[in-house]
Amino acid sequence: MPQTPAAPPPAPAGLMALMLLAAIAVPVYFRGVAHAEGPWRTVIAPFTAAALLAVAIFLVVSKVGLFTMASATVNTVLIALVPAVFLAGLALAQRLKTRRPEVYARFAAEPAPAEHVEHVEHEEGEESQ
């Protein structure tokens, strides 16, 4: 009887892919803003992390059969889910950017200050009484 995997293969591959994207995003972000951080934190460490994560993702994907004990077809479908979901997210973001720019603009917006949130919650509580 085959052993069940600790986690479905798309989960670790997807999480590692997100970490890879974050490692790539750090130097891209710091290249566009003024900062006092040195190159170790803004270039060297993120690129090193990205390279190591890319190797780790390759190893997970190439050995996915050890995780699943499933057929090559099942493994291909499971691993293909990661880029498919990523591309679907990009398509949704692009759609929101063109059709509902006000929603898209709030993606990176800072949350309201805590005092404002408490004030709004207090007012809503008074209205319901």
Image (cartoon, rainbow, N blue to C red):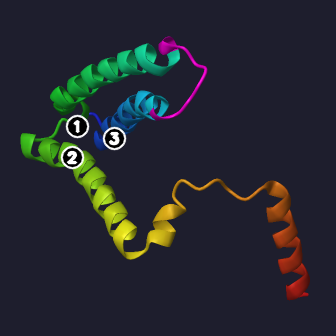
Q: Is 6 inside the magenta-drawn segment?
A: no
Image coordinates of residue 23 in percent, x first then y, are 41, 28
Q: Earlier in the sequence, mark 2 or mark 1?
A: 1
Q: Quadrant of residue 59?
A: top left
Alpha carbon separation for disc pair 2 and 1: 10 Å
The reply to whether dot 2 and dot 1 touch (C-beta < 8 Å) is yes
Which residue occupies 22% across, 37% down?
68
Q: Earlier in the sequence, mark 3 or mark 1?
A: 3
Task: For label 3, count other residues whose C-alpha is less than 10 Å away and answer few (under 14), some (14-19) or many (20+).
Answer: some
Magenta highlight range: 32-40
Residue at the front extreme of this rendering: 34
Q: Quadrant of residue 106?
A: bottom right
The rendered magenta stretch, by its main secondary structure, is classed as: loop
Residue receiving disc 1:
68
* Mark 3: amino acid: Gly
Residue receiving disc 2:
78
